[in-house]
Amino acid sequence: MSLPPHDAWIHTSNNFLPRWKSLSLSHQSTIPISISRVNQVDAARLDVEMSAMLKEQLVKVFSLMKPGMLFQYEAELDAFLEFLIWRFSIWVDKPTPGIALMNLRYRNERAVESRDKVRTGLEGPGLTVAQKLWYCIATVGGQYIWARLQSFSAFRRWGDTEQRPLARRLWTLIQRIEGIYRAASFGNLLIFLCTGRYRNLIERALRARLVYGSPNMNRAVSFEYMNRQLVWNEFSEMLLLLLPLLNSSSVKNLLRPFSKDKSSSSAEDGTACPICQATPTIPFVALPCQHRYCYYCLRTRCAAAPSFRCSRCSEPVVAMQRHGGVLTE
């Protein structure tokens, strides 16, 4: 029995190595990549803010026109702005402003699944013409039609009428469609939080996935800026909640020792209303003590408490009189 040559294993390896590589590449699927869910949600939020900024600037153009006229065409204005964003971004194979800031882009998942060779997991063609058109129809046309349908049904009071059963059925159908859509959106949100794919139902139906545009940069908005923005938003919301609960007169009384010295405060004690601590716009005097009040302050206190006593001297107020005018019981 003769022994094989010493370089036989080298020839065998050279013969089987290309076959092994072709076999492994033929069974290779798309490399699983993890796209930050925060980036995708932030991209949607930035797109909403961009649309709001454009709307604010457009409203200023029509500020000199008839008041309330632009409010009648608010749905058309929103649809027009959304169409402009779609026309100059997705239609020309570019990301929307929010998606571009997050270093993301849309990728056609149907085309990626049919490909064999994938290197980084970020390759893949963009959306097709059909996907772009359906995206426009769903986002721009769908939202506009739904907004107009809701406003029309609310204006016609379909939900309150009992004389027209057809309108009542249409109102019930609208409510059911909205409930089903909200439930489906909630389910899609749970799936998105688990898998990180398809933020909304439109992207899932079109198989349009957000992937990184460049593997070397994750996001264009720094975390420091986003943290400041989040803190400011929460602070402003807290102020909007607390300010209506505060009484302006109590705030003035609290800040008065810090804003004026004792001499000026003592000089103005005789002229300021003792209730609101402001100069009376319609000065009235309480009888019989002759101390000056605002008309609304004094009238409200006397109506609320018939035995109201003067806030300065604690004397019972039996009547009120305009300063230098006619007596009022």
Image (cartoon, rainbow, N blue to C red):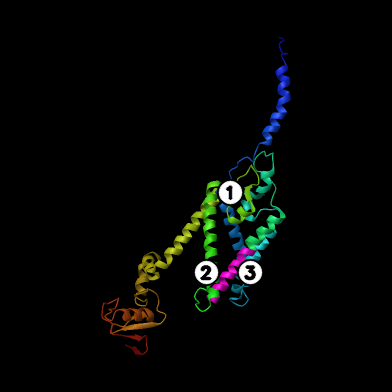
Q: Is residue 97 visible?
A: yes
| Amino acid found under the numbered disc labelled 3 | Glu
State left or right for residue 74 relative to residue 9: left
Instruction: Give above or below for 39 relative to 329.
Output: above
User: Disc 1 marks which residue?
Assistant: 197
Instruction: Give above or below for 205 relative to 152.
Output: above
N-term-proximal mark, 1 vs 3 = 3
Image disc number at residue 226: none
- Which-is-in-front pick, marks 3 and 2? 2
Q: Is residue 103 visible?
A: no
Image disc number at residue 76: 3
Secondary structure of the residue carrying numbered label 1: loop
Identity of the residue furthest to the top in this view: 1
Label 1 CA crowd tier, 10 Å (few <14, some 14–19, many 20+): many
Residues in magenta?
Answer: 141-157
Q: Position of residue 84 (x, y in %)?
A: 68, 62
